[in-house]
Each structure stands twice: as structure tokens, then as C-alpha cells.
């Protein structure tokens, strides 16, 4: 069956819908040029969904209507009553992460806690965190591996370095997005509007940390695995053909909780907090310890810091 024979909920063919949307949404530019070629019939959006304004342009009333619609869709698809929230950045807060490589044992509990919290696809499996295994005496990520067997964790001849979104102050991924579907919030978290993303993958190519993930296949998530506590800009279920990434668990951290990856770390290797607060643990570590960031020479100014300490 050709893509042109697919019908959306408005009865339009895929070709007619895209052509009509390109005229109606001329101001979107590249975003109206194409829906993702990976979409199947079920993924073709309705006219209402496609014409949805950019998240940052929505009124509170618009958001309530959209959240209610998404909650109803989740209930219909998964049989789960989810709550989609919209926690906003707090004044005077800029989140930062510190990871102590000297304590990380490579157990990858953070990887799976992140998946559970953020409703990542289980098949194909999407992971935001890569735990790099490096030979002691070297910090060459190009020669490291992140797919080592579980029984090779805590090898005394290696050290382990989790890598995820660095939440850059100067994020190259934001600069290249042609439709402004990704941006930096005032608390420093880089977010994505999944309904606005066109799946061009420019942000993935621009990120020097391999932190973004593209949904090549329709994400699969069981009812039992679904976390019903969601936020619009973080862990609500994603679609085929869009990008996703770590958001410092904003559905938790903007409510005063720690990221899921930190809570499960058995060695206390992870620290998180408000770097603008002079009394916060992360601020004191950055000021008093010998810290480094990945690929400093690129000028991305990450807010994810590493230390070597016992």
C-alpha cells in the first residue's frame, strides 16, 4: 500500500494533507514541508494535531485542552489514567549535575531507572544514558564501549563514565532546529516539543555528546511499564519519527525531587541541584573540587560536571 492511500481522521490522503498543511502553515517553513516519511497510517496526524500551535505560543486554556486530549488518548491506548502536568521553571534556579567517576561502578542502574521514569520505548529499546567503560589511564571516548556484559561491571582495571544530555548553556542542537521545536528553558533544561518536531535529525547531528535519540520505529511500551505521572515537555509517550532526550526528569526536579538516575545510584556518585544557590551541594563541589566537562574546547558550556574522587 502506498503512503498516498493512507487516510487520516479528516479523510485526507497523506499527499493532500501535507499539501494543504503547507499552504495553511506557510509560516512554519521547513516544518510544513514534510511529515516524517517513517509515519504509518496510525501515526498520520489529524488536522487539529498538525495545526497545533507551538507549545510556547499556547495559552493556559489551549494547554488544558491539549493535555486533556492527550490523557484521553493514553487512556484509550494503554488503559491507564495518566496525568499530564506542565511544571514551569522556577525563578533563580539553574539545574546542574555532578558525577563522581571515582565512585561509579558501571552497574547501569541509572540507565534503567531513567527508562522506567521517562516512558522510553522498550522495543526497540531507547536509552538516554550511556555508561562508557574506559581503560584506566585513558579518557578516549572513541575507544570506549557502553555495551559491555553485566558481569564486566566494577572491573578494577577500568573506570566508568555515564554520559547523557549535558544541558549546555550554549546548545548547538537548539541553533540548528529549523522549526524551533527545541529550546533552552530559564532553568537551563533543553526541551523538545514532540508535536512540533519534524524529525529532520539536525539536532542529533549537531550534538557532540550523542545525547539525542530518534524514533526510527513506533515506540512500544506496555501498560505495566507506563509511568502515569507525566509532563508535556518530558516523559509523555513519544511518536514515531520524532527526537527525544534527557530533560533532567523535569517532571520530578521542578517539583523538588531528584532525577530518577540519582535516586537509584548505589554509590552516591551522582549529585544534583541548583548551581545558583551558593549553599547547594553541586555549587560547593564545582567551586572546591577539580571538575571537568566533556569536550570543553567546543564551547558548549555543559552543566554536567565530572569529578575524580573517592
Image (tube, grey):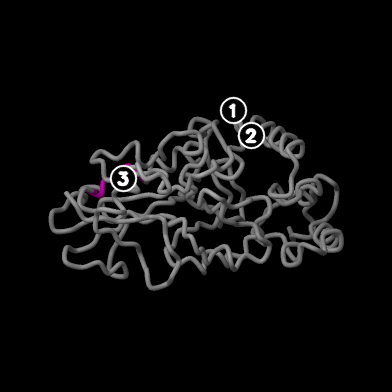
> Residue tagged by mark 1?
80
User: Is residue 26 in view from this perspective?
Assistant: yes
Say which label, 1 or 3, has the lower sequence index. 1
> Residue tagged by mark 3?
270
Q: Point out which mark residue 179 bears.
A: none
Residue nearest the observer in this picture, 176 or 115: 176
The answer to whether 52 appears left or right of 244 in the picture is right
| Cα–Cα span, label 1 and label 3 | 32 Å
**Do the residues under discs 1 and 3 have CB atoms within 8 angstroms?**
no
**Do the residues under discs 3 and 2 have CB atoms within 8 angstroms?**
no
Residue nearest the observer in this picture, 94 or 113: 94
Say which label, 2 or 1, has the lower sequence index. 2
Name, please, the residue furthest toward the left: 156
Q: Residue 157: say if magenta.
A: no
Residue nearest the observer in this picture, 188 or 82: 188
Q: Point out which mark residue 74 bears.
A: 2
The answer to whether 47 appears left or right of 240 in the picture is right
What element does badge 2 sit on?
helix
The answer to whether 1 appears left or right of 211 in the picture is right
The segment highlighted magenta reads 104-110
Amino acid at each position: 500500500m502506498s503512503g498516498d492511500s493512507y487516510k487520516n481522521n479528516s479523510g485526507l490522503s497523506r499527499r493532500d494533507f501535507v499539501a494543504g498543511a503547507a499552504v495553511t502553515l506557510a509560516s512554519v517553513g521547513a516544518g510544513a514541508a514534510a511529515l516524517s516519511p517513517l509515519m504509518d497510517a496510525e501515526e498520520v496526524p489529524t488536522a487539529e494535531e498538525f495545526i497545533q500551535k507551538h507549545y510556547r505560543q499556547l495559552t493556559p486554556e489551549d494547554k488544558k485542552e491539549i493535555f486533556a486530549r492527550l490523557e484521553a488518548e493514553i487512556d484509550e491506548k494503554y488503559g491507564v489514567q495518566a496525568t499530564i502536568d506542565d511544571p514551569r521553571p522556577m525563578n533563580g534556579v539553574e539545574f546542574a549535575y555532578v558525577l563522581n567517576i571515582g565512585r561509579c561502578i558501571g552497574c547501569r542502574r541509572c540507565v534503567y531507572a531513567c527508562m522506567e521514569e521517562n516512558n522510553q520505548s522498550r522495543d526497540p529499546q531507547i536509552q538516554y544514558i550511556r555508561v562508557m567503560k574506559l581503560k584506566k589511564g585513558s579518557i578516549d571516548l572513541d575507544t570506549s564501549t557502553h555495551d559491555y556484559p553485566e558481569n564486566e561491571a566494577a572491573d578494577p582495571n577500568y573506570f566508568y563514565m555515564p554520559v547523557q544530555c549535558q544541558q549546555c548553556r550554549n546548545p548547538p542542537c537548539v541553533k540548528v532546529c529549523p522549526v524551533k521545536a527545541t529550546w533552552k528553558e530559564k532553568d537551563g533544561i533543553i526541551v523538545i516539543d514532540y508535536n512540533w518536531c519534524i524529525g529532520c535529525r539536525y539536532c542529533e547531528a549537531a550534538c557532540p555528546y550523542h545525547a539525542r535519540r530518534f524514533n526510527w520505529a513506533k515506540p512500544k511500551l506496555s501498560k505495566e511499564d507506563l509511568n502515569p505521572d507525566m509532563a508535556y515537555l518530558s516523559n509523555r509517550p513519544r511518536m514515531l519519527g520524532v527526537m527525544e532526550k534527557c530533560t533532567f526528569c523535569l517532571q520530578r526536579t521542578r517539583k523538588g525531587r531528584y532525577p530518577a538516575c540519582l535516586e537509584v545510584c548505589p554509590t552516591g556518585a551522582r549529585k544534583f541541584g541548583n548551581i545558583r544557590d551558593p549553599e547547594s551541594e553541586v555549587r560547593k563541589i564545582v567551586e572546591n573540587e577539580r571538575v571537568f566537562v566533556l569536550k570543553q574546547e567546543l564551547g558548549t558550556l555543559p552543566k554536567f560536571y565530572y569529578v575524580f574522587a573517592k
